[in-house]
Amino acid sequence: MAWHRDYWREIPLADMSDSQWEALCDGCGKCCLQKLEDDDDGEVYYTRLACNLLDLHSCRCTDYPNRVAKVPDCLQLRAEKITEFHWLPVTCAYRLIAEGQDLPDWHPLISGSPESIHAAGISVRGRAQPLHTVPEDDWQEEVVHWVDL
């Protein structure tokens, strides 16, 4: 099935094909950062610690088809869980579309370039480090407060 350039403006997330859904990913890498949840209020905090499968330059998973088998707590984003998207970064296309907003100019579907997200400073390129480099007891020290999270 061919899809038109601005399909996300007309097709609900739940009705998108797998390829349309996957194309929405902007490649920021933020969902691959270790997150900590406050037990008291449920607030989610991002750390700068990236999943060991994340390529810190491209900000893409190095083994996307097998990620869930290799990283059991890897979260699969699916339209059925749209009400849970509040934890996603405010710049995430899935969250933006779920909240009725449009994609920003730097999104690869708008710009035509996968590098536009990095040029805009939205991705984790140059800001994250591998999860395995920091002991779990020290993860709280790695919480980040980036404006675009």
Image (cartoon, rainbow, N blue to C red):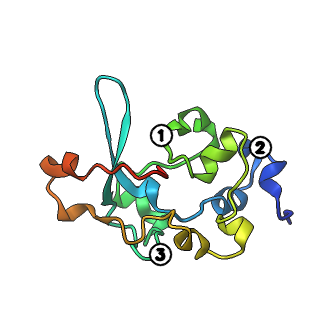
Asked if residue 93 lies left or right of residue 43, the reply is right
Q: Please give the residue where the numbered disc 3 appears in the rendered image.
A: 58
Tell me the quarter of the image containing the N terminus: bottom right
Which is nearer the eye, 102 or 3? 102
Q: Please give the residue where the numbered disc 1 appears in the rendered image.
A: 87
Depth check, mark 2 against mark 3: the one in front is: 3
User: Mark 1 is on which residue type?
Assistant: Trp
Q: Is residue 80 above or below residue 62?
A: above
Looking at the image, which residue is at 29% across and 23% down? 40
Task: Give x and y (percent) for residue 116.
Answer: 61, 73
Measured in 3D between alpha carbons, the distance from the residue under mark 2 to the one under mark 1, in whole angstroms, is 20 Å
User: Mark 3 is on which residue type?
Assistant: Ser
Measured in 3D between alpha carbons, the distance from the residue under mark 3 to the one under mark 1, in whole angstroms, is 23 Å
Quadrant of residue 25 within the rendered picture: bottom right
Few, some or many C-alpha atoms within 10 Å of disc 3 (few <14, some 14-19, many ≥20)?
A: some
Q: Is residue 3 above or below residue 56?
A: above
Asked if residue 69 lies left or right of residue 5, the reply is left
Q: Earlier in the sequence, mark 2 or mark 3?
A: 2
Q: Secondary structure at mark 3?
A: loop
Q: Please give the residue where the numbered disc 2 appears in the rendered image.
A: 12
Measured in 3D between alpha carbons, the distance from the residue under mark 2 to the one under mark 3, in whole angstroms, is 28 Å
Q: Secondary structure at mark 1?
A: helix
Number of callouts: 3
Few, some or many C-alpha atoms within 10 Å of disc 2 (few <14, some 14-19, many ≥20)?
A: few
Looking at the image, which residue is at 67% across and 40% down? 98
Task: Give x and y (percent) for residue 55.
Answer: 40, 73
